[in-house]
Image: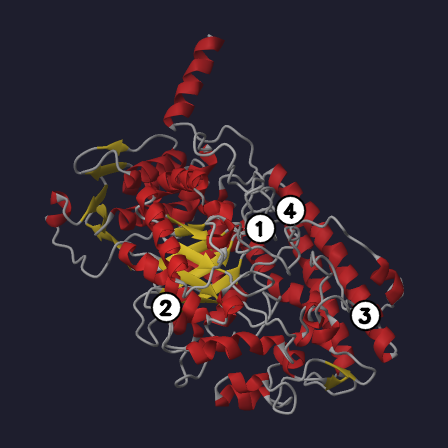
Amino acid sequence: MRHLRNLLVGLLLATGLVTHSHAEDGYDLWLRSRPLAGTALSHLETRLATIETADPQGLAVAELSRGLTGLLGRSPALEKGGAVLLGLADDPAIRALKLDLTGLGPDGYIIRTFGPRTIVAAEGRNGLLYGAFHLLRLARTGSLPATLDVREVPKIDRRILNHWDDLDRHVERGYSGQSIWDWHKLPDWKDPRYTDYARANASIGINGTVLNNVNANATILTAPYLEKVAALADVFRPYGIKVYLTARFSAPKEIGGLPTADPLDKDVIRWWQAKVDEIYTRIPDFGGFLIKANSEGQPGPQDYGRTHADGANMLADAMAPHGGIVMWRAFVYSHEVPDDRAKQAYDEFVPLDGKFRDNVLVQVKNGAIDFQPREPFHPLFGAMPKTKLMMEFQITKEYLGFATHLAYLAPMWKEVLDADTYRPKQGSTVAKVVDGSLDGHKLSAMAGVANIGTDRNWAGSQFDQANWYAYGRLAWNHDLTSEAIAREWIAATFSPDPAILDPILSMMMPSHQAVVDYMTPLGLHHLMGRGHHYGPGPWVEGGPRSDWTSVYYHRATKDGIGFDRTATGSDAISQYAKPLADRFNKVETTPEEFLLWFHHVRWDRKMPSGRTLWAELLHHYGRGIATVDGMITRWDGLKGRIDDARHAEVAAFLAIQRKEAQWWRDASVAYWQSINGLPLPKGEAPPPHDAAYYKALSFPFAPGDGK
């Protein structure tokens, strides 16, 4: 009997009818489907227990069936006249309904109630898959309304993850294990995790992935590795996901045997054309190239006296016959240290506005420095109307506490997307620039630097999954609120029960501000440890470049602190439209969260709160720590309501966050006191050590560093 029972379980696992044999560990992400009970089960039995489709072998119906099996505790029946009708525009049953499916494009879909039936329809297979995942999201989160009338078309065309993964499986700025791409075993072994990766991305609308690091290795473009890339493309294709590669600009020299990589050299042009043709022979739907050039030592067109446009256009011309694109990063460093690094991308790229090919997108980080805990939006978003600009967000938390600090990033991303550039007029938000609607660009894209690795929970911690989820949802629809996205994620990942959802929501929503408070309050930035960016390092100075140091940015003296970017300082404010430049030029009108970003301010200046700047800094440090304390209390209150394994992991990470938040406060205060010599405000505890102690701490093996 035991043998027969084991055989039966094995058959059920093989057919997907039993999908959760392991303990809760986060592997299922937001696709977690647990059996419902009571009225919730009865509601679902009535609404979604049977499916009609003209394509019973299709991926959309397979995913819908898989998800509903977990929720219903049994497989939904496939039958004519089913409660759910799933089909494409040319399916007879869909045509008979005379639905208006025009304008949905390849990714759009509708979900509509027709009497007792729920209709999911789309023009293309990708749209149908997205529609199936949307319906499952409603079912999983307990938010399936009595009547459905949904019409969804993504606001961004290319919704892409950027993996900073090296070919040796090291992940730069990765905090969740090795790279999931096992290049050594590819193409012959396709890890089942690759399919689960594709499922997770498709469920939130992501439709592209850059497989390798922006600090590229030209080997990825050789024939053996292109065969491996093609194997991954085969896995991802059914889920509507295209593969992209970061190409090293000097590849014609490094693997092509040419003496130059000059983008205007005829032999170089021919080499790239042949290489692109080779790629498309292997991967007909290849998405295109991402390029990091003339930045942080990477080769580029400026090595030959050419411009970024010269380099991008050469590659774009090779891509154009195949429908591929070039994403050219605007994160650049000059060989000479500028007076203000925040100005450099604007200075290099604005003169090139309108000079890029139609299939080139300039990829711009959300802020002008480097994924800081908070930055004002990058001035390029208000300065290049003739150029397609795509957003680059960082999902992995390089400057936000790595994997152990709970920091929900959707509020930060929304702050940037909703920011008004005032160019050409008020209401010209960054989101409208990125989606192309402001300037009439038809091609649009958004990139997120992935936080994914080989850890069982994918992202290094349970709550870092929320940032992957939120990125996908905002790339699909930037009008969603960060709270709405958090509610979806909590309900699907933990439970829709308000007794669970509400406390977790109250942890997530203030969490980003908490990290800003205890790390870089009031517009301070780039204060982390050198190289690995772990822990506080406001004292960092020296080295090959001053703009790689902390003192370059905070400019603290006995009298004051902050970087003067006003008209009498570096004049970085002039890169913004006049209404913003005028606002940022005055201390009184600069938003408090960006005060020390734009101004050097006296320690004794009175703030709107009535406190001095020095006391206000201390207040923010304390507020950040208090927020973490509140998160710990709320999570402790959920013990017994959350499965033991995930509850214990989060509790341990919150304890780490609390300890490190205190470290940030104490080390920063000790250092500032060593500069300003000021006493602590009444009620503020002194740091347990002096600045020299904190400065002497060393972390040579902190994870995620570059090599």
**Numbered disc 4: secondary structure:** helix
- Cβ atoms at labels 4 and 1 below 8 Å apart: yes
Q: Name the residue that disc number 4 marks.
A: 650
> In the shown orientation, is residue 77 left or right of residue 201?
left
Q: Position of residue 647 (x, y in %)?
A: 63, 43
Residue at 84% in and 69% down: 670
- Which of the two discs, 2 and 1, sits closer to the camera? 2
The mark found on residue 435 in the picture is 2
Tell me if mark 1 has few (under 14), some (14-19) or many (20+) residues whose alpha carbon lies within 10 angstroms of its own. many
Going from the N terminus, do you reach mark 2 or mark 1 first?
2
The picture quadrant where one finds residue 509 is bottom right
Q: Disc 2 versus disc 3: distance between alpha carbons?
A: 42 Å
Residue pictured at 49% horizontal, 90% vertical: 578
Between 551 and 96, the residue placed more toward the observer is: 551
Q: Which numbered tag is attached to residue 407?
A: none
Q: State the SS at label 3.
A: helix
Q: Which residue is mark 1?
A: 463
Q: Nearer the viewer, mark 2 or mark 3?
A: 2
Helix, strand or loop status at disc 1: loop
Whole-number angstrom distance, CA of label 2 to CA of label 1: 28 Å
Query: CB of mark 4 within 8 Å of CB of mark 3?
Result: no
Tag 4: amino acid: Val
